[in-house]
Structure formats: structure tokens, C-alpha cells
């Protein structure tokens, strides 16, 4: 695995380096994630706390997730790319912001029961009905 791995937003104003190996890669089908993704689900790379170093400015806002936990979503204020979300005990980096995500694929699907009817879940993922 190419550790550290790097990524950034669409316009280039925000860059990051992650110094730890991901703990897992998830697809989330909850309504919040679908709304901010503007798509059918989000793919997130979960990494340990304090493992991501950001260069550039992020804007953030805190929301209560379906799980009841507070999560803080961080995005580039210029282009709006979602970079990462601060979770209880970790960070979720947006899969699509990695410079190279070809070495990672989803292992778990959160809210598999909420997936849109036209979405085919990955054949080799663990399906969870609620947040872990
Ligand atoms: Zn940007
Ligand atoms: Zn979600």
C-alpha cells in the first residue's frame, strides 16, 4: 500500500497527506451522504485520528448523523469538494479525492437497506443495516 497517500480538491487549493494505512473503505447509502455527494452513495476511506495533514483552507460544519453522533464535514470553500469528515474515533477521507485510489475498494456498506432501488450493492462487501 502506498503510505503515505495524497489527495486534494478539484481546484487544487486544498491538498492533504495521510500518514497511516486505512482501516477500511466504506460505501454509505444514508440520506445525508447521498445529499452531500449529489449521488447515490458516498465512498469513504476511514483512517485513524490525526493521520491527515491538510494544506490550504477547509470550511466545515457540524451535523448530527443518523447514528446520533456529531460529525464534522470539511470541504474546499472555493470548489466545494468534500475532503474529509471527522467521526467518532477517526476520519473519513473522500475516496474520490485521492490522487490514486486504484489500490482501495469498498469492504463495507453502511445503510445497505437504504440503498436506492436501482443501485447494485458490491458483491464482495459486508452489508450493514445501520452505522457501525
Ligand atoms: Zn478546491
Ligand atoms: Zn452516510
Image (cartoon, rainbow, N blue to C red):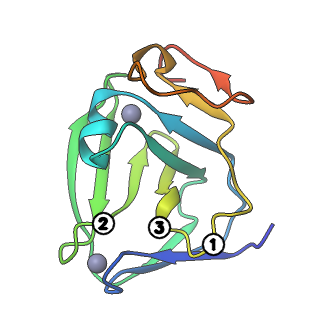
Q: Secondary structure at mark 2?
A: loop
User: Which residue matches tag 3?
Assistant: 97
Q: Secondary structure at mark 3?
A: helix
Q: Residue at the spot x=63%, y=64% of the render?
A: 101
Q: Residue at the spot x=30%, y=66% of the render?
A: 81
Quarter of the image for residue 104 reads bottom right
Q: Which residue lies most toward the right here?
A: 1
Q: Residue at the spot x=69%, y=37% of the render?
A: 107
Specify few, some or many for label 1: CA neighbours under 10 Å numbering under 14, 14-19, or 20 or more: few
User: Which residue matches tag 1?
Assistant: 100
Q: Quadrant of the N terminus?
A: bottom right
Q: Residue at the spot x=71%, y=27% of the render?
A: 123
Determine whether, in the image, residue 97 is placed left or right of residue 67: right
Task: Find ligand 2 in the image and state its quadrant.
Answer: top left
Seen from the viewer's position, the closer of residues 36 and 14 is: 36
User: Which residue matches tag 2?
Assistant: 81
Specify few, some or many for label 2: CA neighbours under 10 Å numbering under 14, 14-19, or 20 or more: many
Amino acid at each position: 500500500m502506498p503510505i503515505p497517500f495524497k489527495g486534494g480538491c478539484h481546484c487544487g487549493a486544498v491538498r492533504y497527506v495521510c500518514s497511516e494505512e486505512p482501516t477500511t473503505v466504506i460505501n454509505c447509502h444514508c440520506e445525508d451522504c447521498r445529499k452531500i455527494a449529489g449521488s447515490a452513495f458516498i465512498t469513504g476511506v476511514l483512517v485513524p485520528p490525526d493521520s491527515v495533514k491538510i494544506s490550504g483552507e477547509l470550511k466545515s460544519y457540524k451535523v448530527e448523523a443518523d447514528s446520533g453522533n456529531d460529525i464534522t464535514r470539511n470541504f474546499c470553500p472555493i470548489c466545494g469538494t468534500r475532503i474529509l469528515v471527522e467521526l467518532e474515533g477517526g476520519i473519513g477521507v473522500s475516496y474520490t479525492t485521492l490522487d490514486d485510489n486504484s489500490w482501495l475498494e469498498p469492504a463495507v456498506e453502511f445503510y445497505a437497506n437504504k440503498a436506492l432501488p436501482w443501485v447494485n450493492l458490491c458483491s464482495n462487501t459486508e452489508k450493514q443495516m445501520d452505522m457501525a
